[in-house]
């Protein structure tokens, strides 16, 4: 009977030869980076780049201290601590090959909700030079309709009057920077790793808005002292499944929370840091003067493409992204969306061939060993679509471009939010902070075809565009009548091919 080896520091030398393990002295690592939001993506991306860097450089200054702000982060913190902050990164190739690699760059974890003061002390420590973030789009408290910080959120209201016991990200950052300034320490860099266009600029704008209201003098110091480099991040990282854990056990290793990902990875960063940084370019990151064209390309093609497949596929009854791509109709539809509605409004990107990039995206989406569940793709769509798809619609309306492919996605999202089931009546797993509000607006659609679009915090003034609403109303009425999203996709593809023939 095979016995499994528990993943921890003392057992590293006992792991199977097929497992790649850290080749640096983790006992000497100091946490120069505090990362807030230790989910799967951070562990497949920044922590992996950092692991490469530590292996190459043997630096002792750039370990990572993970930080969770919510009670929901306790589980990952407890598991990481139990495993000496080690975990397995399972890289799944399209041909079926699997690489098992133990990542060692995380060396500590702090649950801020247990002791907010201790968390801000850790952020304010002289050792901390970079605070990086994967807090998802909703964590930025950004109102897409007003382009302003949302001061109405209860946690924001709490933090404004309780600066020493914050609950949300900008309360923690403001308090930590207040402590650093008081100690005469240089400001740390705040490095967003979220899928938001101009994520550094967004972080800066939201933090300064909050700090200005809480402490205007401190806000001036933050404005002049803190760097917020924009960055584009990319690596498809599906949720870990029980099967992933079982496969590792069959290989002889017990890891309570491994991470799976595709082989492709990309990180493009503007080189603006307040207090030093790792030499990440030595391990594949790319530093540029302006990340805008790269991030716009990725958000409008990859992230939007995911949402197109996620919402249409969910309504149709597909379960995973690769399952969508295996369906020729869905593969053709997302490619035509990219070609007809996105590419014409993208600026040229240095050293990137857009046709090759789009083909690579389709191949990545179709990786049969990355079972990326559509429920994960559709997670918090109310934060994603206003950044990934609505801006493309607005630009095409302004320039006279096509909006039909995107309009059907919005119609599908309405049906998804209203009915909560696929066309076959199978319940959908909808997770969204605005779920109730989305349902409230969408549920009025059969009485008012434009009801969903009147949710202006998501759609802005899109409902005012007759060009868009004419298309949308026809689509949503047809969808509500026959529930056959595939038939409408087929019609749009046929019309599009006729126009370009």
Image: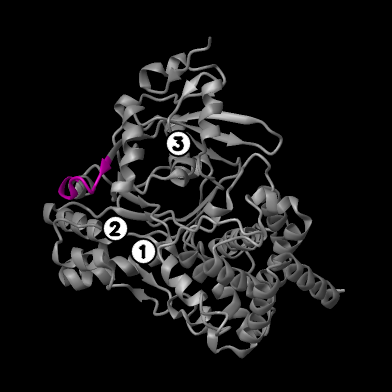
In the image, what residue occupies the spot 68% across and 82% down? 474
At mark 1, the secondary structure is: helix
Residue at numbered disc 2: 169
Range drawn in magenta: 110-118
Q: What number is the disc on residue 152? A: none
Residue at numbered disc 3: 53
Do the CB atoms of the residues marked 1 and 2 lie less than 8 Å apart? yes
Residue at numbered disc 1: 140
Which quadrant is home to the C terminus?
bottom right
| Viewer-nearest of discs 3 and 1 | 1
318 or 282: nearer the viewer? 318
State left or right for residue 14 relative to residue 390: left
Q: Is residue 123 above or below residue 459?
A: above
Do the CB atoms of the residues marked 2 and 3 lie less than 8 Å apart? no
Image coords of residue 141 (percent x, y): 34, 67
State left or right for residue 340 relative to residue 212: right
């Amino acid at each position: 009977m095979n016995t499994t080896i528990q993943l921890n520091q003392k057992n590293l030398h006992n792991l199977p030869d097929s497992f790649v393990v850290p080749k640096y002295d983790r006992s000497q690592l100091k946490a120069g980076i505090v990362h807030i939001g230790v989910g799967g993506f951070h562990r497949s991306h920044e922590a992996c780049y950092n692991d490469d860097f530590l292996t190459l450089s043997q630096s002792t200054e750039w370990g990572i201290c993970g930080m969770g702000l919510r009670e929901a982060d306790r589980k990952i913190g407890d598991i990481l601590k139990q495993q000496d902050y080690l975990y397995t990164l399972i890289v799944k190739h399209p041909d079926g090959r699997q690489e098992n690699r133990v990542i060692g760059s995380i060396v500590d974890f702090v649950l801020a909700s247990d002791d907010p003061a201790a968390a801000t002390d850790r952020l304010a420590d002289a050792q901390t030079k970079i605070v990086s973030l994967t807090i998802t789009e909703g964590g930025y408290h950004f109102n897409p309709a007003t382009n302003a910080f949302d001061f109405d959120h209860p946690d924001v209201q709490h933090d404004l009057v309780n600066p020493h016991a914050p609950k949300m990200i900008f309360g923690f950052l403001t308090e930590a920077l207040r402590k650093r300034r008081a100690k005469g320490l240089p400001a740390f860099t705040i490095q967003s790793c979220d899928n938001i266009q101009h994520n550094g600029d967004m972080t800066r704008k939201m933090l300064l808005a909050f700090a200005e209201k809480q402490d205007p003098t401190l806000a001036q110091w933050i404005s002049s002292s803190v760097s917020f480099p924009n960055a584009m991040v990319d690596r498809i990282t599906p949720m870990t499944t029980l099967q992933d854990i079982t496969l590792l056990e069959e290989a002889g290793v017990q890891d309570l929370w491994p991470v799976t990902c595709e082989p492709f990875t990309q990180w493009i960063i503007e080189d603006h840091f307040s207090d030093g940084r790792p030499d990440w370019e030595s391990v594949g990151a790319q530093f540029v003067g302006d990340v805008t064209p790269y991030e716009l390309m990725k958000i409008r093609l990859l992230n939007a493409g995911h949402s197109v497949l996620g919402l249409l596929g969910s309504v149709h009854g597909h379960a995973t992204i690769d399952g969508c791509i295996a369906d020729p109709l869905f593969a053709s539809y997302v490619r035509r969306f990219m070609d007809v509605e996105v590419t014409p409004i993208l600026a040229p990107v240095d050293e990137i061939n857009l046709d090759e990039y789009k083909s690579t995206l389709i191949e990545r989406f179709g990786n049969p060993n990355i079972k990326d569940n559509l429920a994960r793709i559709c997670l918090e769509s109310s934060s994603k679509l206003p950044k990934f798809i609505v801006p493309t619609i607005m630009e095409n309306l302004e320039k006279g471009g096509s909006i039909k492919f995107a309009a059907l996605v919005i119609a599908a999202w309405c049906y998804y939010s209203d009915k909560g089931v696929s066309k076959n009546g199978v319940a959908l797993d909808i997770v969204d902070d605005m779920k109730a509000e989305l349902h409230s607006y969408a549920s009025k659609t059969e009485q008012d075809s434009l009801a969903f679009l009147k949710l202006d915090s998501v759609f802005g003034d899109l409902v005012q565009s007759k060009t868009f609403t004419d298309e949308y109303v026809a689509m949503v009425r047809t969808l509500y009548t026959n529930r056959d999203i595939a038939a409408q996709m087929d019609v749009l593809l046929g019309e599009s091919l006729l126009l370009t023939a």
